[in-house]
Amino acid sequence: MCIFCKIVAGEIPANKVMENEEFLAFHDINPKAPIHILIIPKHHVENFQSTPPELMAKMTPFIQEVAKKLELDKTGYRLIVNNGEDGGQEVMHLHFHMLGGAKLSWPYLAIEEEAKKYM
Ligand code: 5GP
Ligand code: ZN
């Protein structure tokens, strides 16, 4: 069972923000912004690339509700999905990072030596 499936099963504790039958939102253990939430489907899906559109149709309003609950709908936020190796995905269970609580920077993100490959 993957680490997020263990959180869904209650085998690993998490600081939950919101949940319904199908989705769960909880605080990231290593926040990259004042507010850093992970939003996942309870059912295991490996990554965004393999996510069926029907799941996204239901996940979108859940993500919007999480933003409202944290009042980020008013101030703004960033959603990030790391997909696969170059995307830096470490946990192979679909998750959206919701970042906010401050104005966020928007740096050039490629690792320099890696980026040279494409120059
Ligand atoms: P990824 O790099 O796969 O997009 O992001 C995985 C995220 O999961 C990271 O931001 C990391 O801090 C977070 N994370 C990893 N293990 C745990 C955990 O056990 N609990 C919580 N709350 N977050 C975790
Ligand atoms: Zn999983």
Image: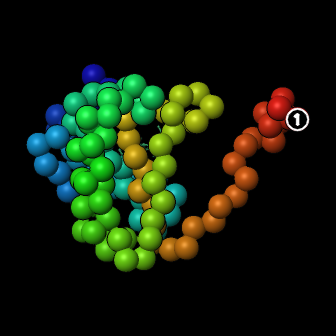
> Does residue 42 appear to the left or right of 2 in the view shown?
left
For label 1, being within 8 Å of ligand 1 is answered: no
Mark 1, secondary structure of its residue: loop
Q: Is residue 29 visible?
A: no
Q: Position of residue 82 (x, y in %)?
A: 51, 39
Of residue 74 and residue 100, the one placed in the foreground of this image is: 74
The amino acid pointed to by label 1 is Met
Q: Position of residue 57 (x, y in %)?
A: 27, 43
Image: 5 above or below 30: above
Q: Residue at x 24, y 68 (%)?
A: 69
Q: Position of residue 14 (x, y in %)?
A: 26, 49
Q: Residue at x 73, y 43 (%)?
A: 110
> Does residue 69 appear to the left or right of 114 in the view shown?
left
> Does residue 104 appear to the left or right of 109 in the view shown?
left
> Does residue 23 appear to the left or right of 75 in the view shown?
left
Q: Residue at x 30, y 50 (%)?
A: 60
Image: 18 above or below 81: below
Q: Residue at x 35, y 71 (%)?
A: 73
Q: Is residue 82 visible?
A: yes
Quadrant assignment for the C terminus: top right
Quadrant in which residue 40 is drawn: top left
**Extreme residue toward the top, this view:** 1
Image: 38 above or below 99: above
Residue under numbered circle 1:
119
